[in-house]
Image: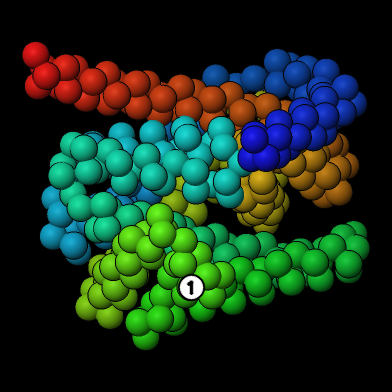
């Protein structure tokens, strides 16, 4: 009940923020899009944004291969989109869909839950590490912008330091065999709860497999990390062509900052970062381009893009569920 109330409250706040910006700059943004729409650039954007999921799927495939688990790239891409869809609609820092990915691996490929969970956590670790590095580049750019208040720069810098610290602790404790997740459960004495005793043992097994990957598969770790570089390049191109599709051409540093704002919005405890993403983009383009309508127009088109992929992801989940319900039915008749 408490979780449901929190979700509803976060949605109300998100819709409220979204509504404010829709009222203030919504009409100007729509006119900006319709008055300058370039179908050529829009088609290039559609191609780039579709390809942008490939590096993520490839990263996960590299990790699974290190565990000697072979899954076709198309299957992994399907599971990645399914996880994306669930994560997008849940207020869980962009990780809500990971259990779905593990479940689909187990059901369709009989991959042990411990290995599946390890692979997904490693995938998210590399993603967050890449995000932190990308955020560091954005922070350097911010410090050279005199129009941004020093307090905001310090707050963003502090958040980035915290993220790097968490990632380092997770990596270090996993490598030395003192996993973070199981240690947290023990320190909170959750292991004393009968139903959670087995869960703690499972966590330790997952952490051992993660440590094995870090220590014994350095080449695969490097290869998996390199996919984030490709993803970052595609993200820059994605934002570039989306802005060009409604007549806006901005330098690369603004594109990087827009992507950083997007990344921050995805880890806020609001489904789809609703309102947060819009507020960030409007503020960014008001500050750097003197026109918040550009930021809101960008947000609107990104929302449409996201909803299309969410619909695709849920169609995969529906097909997956239907197939396994049918298989279960056939076994019982």
Q: Image point 46% across, 22% down: which residue? A: 311
Tell me the quarter of the image containing the C terminus.
top left
Q: Image point 61% across, 28% down: which residue? A: 303
Does residue 107 appear to the left or right of 287 in the view shown? left
Q: Could you classify mark 1 by the number of other residues whose Cα lies within 10 Å: few (under 14), some (14-19), or many (20 or more)?
A: some
Instruction: Write down the quadrant of residue 133 in the picture.
Output: bottom right
Rendering coords of residue 87 (x, y %): 50, 39
Q: How many marks?
A: 1
Between 5 and 147, the residue placed more toward the observer is: 5
Rendering coords of residue 138 (x, y %): 67, 62
Height in image: 154 above or below 112?
A: below
Rendering coords of residue 289 (x, y %): 82, 44
Does residue 125 appear to the left or right of 103 in the view shown? right
Instruction: Write down the quadrant of residue 271 in the picture.
Output: top right
Q: Which residue is mark 1?
A: 186
Residue 226 appears in the picture as rendered = no
Residue 277 appears in the picture as rendered = yes
Q: Image point 46% across, 28% down: which residue? A: 309
Does residue 78 appear to the left or right of 260 in the view shown? left
Q: Image point 64% across, 40% down: which residue? A: 3
Disc 1 secondary structure class: helix
Q: How is the structure coloured here? A: rainbow
Between 41 and 4, the residue placed more toward the observer is: 4
Height in image: 156 above or below 277?
A: below
Tell me the quarter of the image containing the N terminus.
top right
Rendering coords of residue 4 (x, y %): 64, 34
Height in image: 329 above or below 299?
A: above
Between 307 and 329, the residue placed more toward the observer is: 329
Between 172 and 32, the residue placed more toward the observer is: 172
Residue furthest out toward the bottom: 176
């Amino acid at each position: 009940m408490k979780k449901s109330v929190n979700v509803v409250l976060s949605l109300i706040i998100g819709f409220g923020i979204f509504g404010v910006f829709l009222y203030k700059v919504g009409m100007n943004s729509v006119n900006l899009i319709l008055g300058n729409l370039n179908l050529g650039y829009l088609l290039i954007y559609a191609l780039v944004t579709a390809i942008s999921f490939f590096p993520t799927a490839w990263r996960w495939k590299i990790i699974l291969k290190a565990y000697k688990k072979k899954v076709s790239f198309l299957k992994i891409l399907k599971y990645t989109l399914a996880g994306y869809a669930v994560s997008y609609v849940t207020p869980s820092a962009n990780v809500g869909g990971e259990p779905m990915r593990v479940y689909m691996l187990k059901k369709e490929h009989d991959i042990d839950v411990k290995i599946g969970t390890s692979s997904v956590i490693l995938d998210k670790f590399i993603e967050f590490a890449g995000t932190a590095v990308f955020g560091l580049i954005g922070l350097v750019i911010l410090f050279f912008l005199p129009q941004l208040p020093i307090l905001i720069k310090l707050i963003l810098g502090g958040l980035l330091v915290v993220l790097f610290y968490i990632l380092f602790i997770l990596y270090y404790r996993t490598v030395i065999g003192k996993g973070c997740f199981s240690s947290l459960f023990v320190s909170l004495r959750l292991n004393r709860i009968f139903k959670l005793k087995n869960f703690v043992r499972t966590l330790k097994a997952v952490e051992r497999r993660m440590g094995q990957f870090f220590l014994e598969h350095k080449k695969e770790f490097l290869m998996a990390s390199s996919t984030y570089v490709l993803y970052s390049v595609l993200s820059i191109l994605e934002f570039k062509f989306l802005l060009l599709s409604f007549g806006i051409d901005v330098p690369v540093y603004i594109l990087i900052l827009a992507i950083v704002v997007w990344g921050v919005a995805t880890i806020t405890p609001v489904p789809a970062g609703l309102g947060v993403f819009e507020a960030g983009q409007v503020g960014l383009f008001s500050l750097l381009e003197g026109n918040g309508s550009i930021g809101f127009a960008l947000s609107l088109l990104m929302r449409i893009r996201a909803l299309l992929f969410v619909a695709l992801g849920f169609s995969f989940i529906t097909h997956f569920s239907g197939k396994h319900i049918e298989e279960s039915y056939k076994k019982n008749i």
